[in-house]
Image (tube, rainbow, N blue to C red):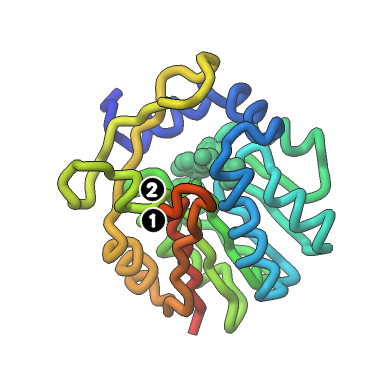
């Protein structure tokens, strides 16, 4: 398998499903605990959607939060059956196993008022394809809300050019192995991705880590015309 490919992204998440579920549920990732969980919940709730699609929902924390605390009707989808089973076990929202590739021909009726992707758009063509489908799943005026690693911070000293990067679990416990590669996109290329899909960016946020005052993420909200 090509180590820098969409297929390898899925392969690695199969391997790390249990470790990922444990660390998310133990609130073990500092940037999530301090900054990015609240940032995505705030970005979604401010738009008060009734129906939400959580793309790449993982073990389901965001779907659960939006459904149980904010009374939204949420569908979470993820390619990894082990993660979806864990999400289903805690309930709150509905969950399905679905890869972005498998969603290419999918229709949702009624449509969603918001499609949310929290640190889950990791690949190249798979992500281009699923983002291109988002407008077809949104109601008129509905929003696509993406949170991702901040391009400048996550890329370090490497050339600021869109392309594949090897994965790393630096700073994560030893239960994590075989890190997923990820497709780095510059900020301009994130914006182009949503514009190419026919969506209009209405908000771009860079939530700051409270102590380092460096951006903990890049958060883009784009609206269906
Ligand atoms: C960093 S986790 C984030 C999970 C969740 N959104 C959260 O905030 O905890 C990335 C997730 O994206 C999912 N994912 C990556 N590529 C995917 C694809 N092509 N199709 C479906 N899910 C994918 C992985 O399985 C994983 O659950």
Left or right? Give the position of 31 relative to 178. right
From this view, report whether residue 63 is shown above or below residue 84. Answer: below
From this view, report whether residue 118 is shown above or below residue 89. Answer: below
Q: Position of residue 133 (x, y in %)?
A: 46, 63
Q: Position of residue 159 (x, y in %)?
A: 15, 46
Q: Is residue 12 visible?
A: yes
Picture quadrant where residue 88 is located = top right
Instruction: Name the residue located 60 percent from the left edge and 59 percent from the top edge.
Output: 40
- Asked whether the residues under the numbered discs 1 and 2 touch, taking CB atoms below 8 Å apart as contact, a structural biologist would say yes
Instruction: Name the residue located 58 percent from the left edge and 36 percent from the top edge.
Output: 29
Q: Is residue 81 visible?
A: no
Tell me the tag on residue 19.
none
User: Marks 1 and 2, how far apart in space?
Assistant: 5 Å
Left or right? Give the position of 36 relative to 126. right
Disc 1 is placed on an element classified as helix
Q: Position of residue 150 (x, y in %)?
A: 39, 53
Instruction: Name the residue located 65 percent from the left edge and 56 percent from the top edge.
Output: 38
Answer yes or no: disc 1 within 8 Å of ligand 1: no
Name the residue tied to disc 1. 129
Image quadrant occupied by the N terminus: top left
Instruction: Name the residue located 41 percent from the left edge and 25 percent from the top edge.
Output: 170
Residue most extreme to the left: 159
Tell me the tag on residue 126.
2
Question: How many marks do you count on the picture?
Answer: 2
Disc 2 is placed on an element classified as helix
Answer yes or no: disc 2 within 8 Å of ligand 1: yes
């Amino acid at each position: 398998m090509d180590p820098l490919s969409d297929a390898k992204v899925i392969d690695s998440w199969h391997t790390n499903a249990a470790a990922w579920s444990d660390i998310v549920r133990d609130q073990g990732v500092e940037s999530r605990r301090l900054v990015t969980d609240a940032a995505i919940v705030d970005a979604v709730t401010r738009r008060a959607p009734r129906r939400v699609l959580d793309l790449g929902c993982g073990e389901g924390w965001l779907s659960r939060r939006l459904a149980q605390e904010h009374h939204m009707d949420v569908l979470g989808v993820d390619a990894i059956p082990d993660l979806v089973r864990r999400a289903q076990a805690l309930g709150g929202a509905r969950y399905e196993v679905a890869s972005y590739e498998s969603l290419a021909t999918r229709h949702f009726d009624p449509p969603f008022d918001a499609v949310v992707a929290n640190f889950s758009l990791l690949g190249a063509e798979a992500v281009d394809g699923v983002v291109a489908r988002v407008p077809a799943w949104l109601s008129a005026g509905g929003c696509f809300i993406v949170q991702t690693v901040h391009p400048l911070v996550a890329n370090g000293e490497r050339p600021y050019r869109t392309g594949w990067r090897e994965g790393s679990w630096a700073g994560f416990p030893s239960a994590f192995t075989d890190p997923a590669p990820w497709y780095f996109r510059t900020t301009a290329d994130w914006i182009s991705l949503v514009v190419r899909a026919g969506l209009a960016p209405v908000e771009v946020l860079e939530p700051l880590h409270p102590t380092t005052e460096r951006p903990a993420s890049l958060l883009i909200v784009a609206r269906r015309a």
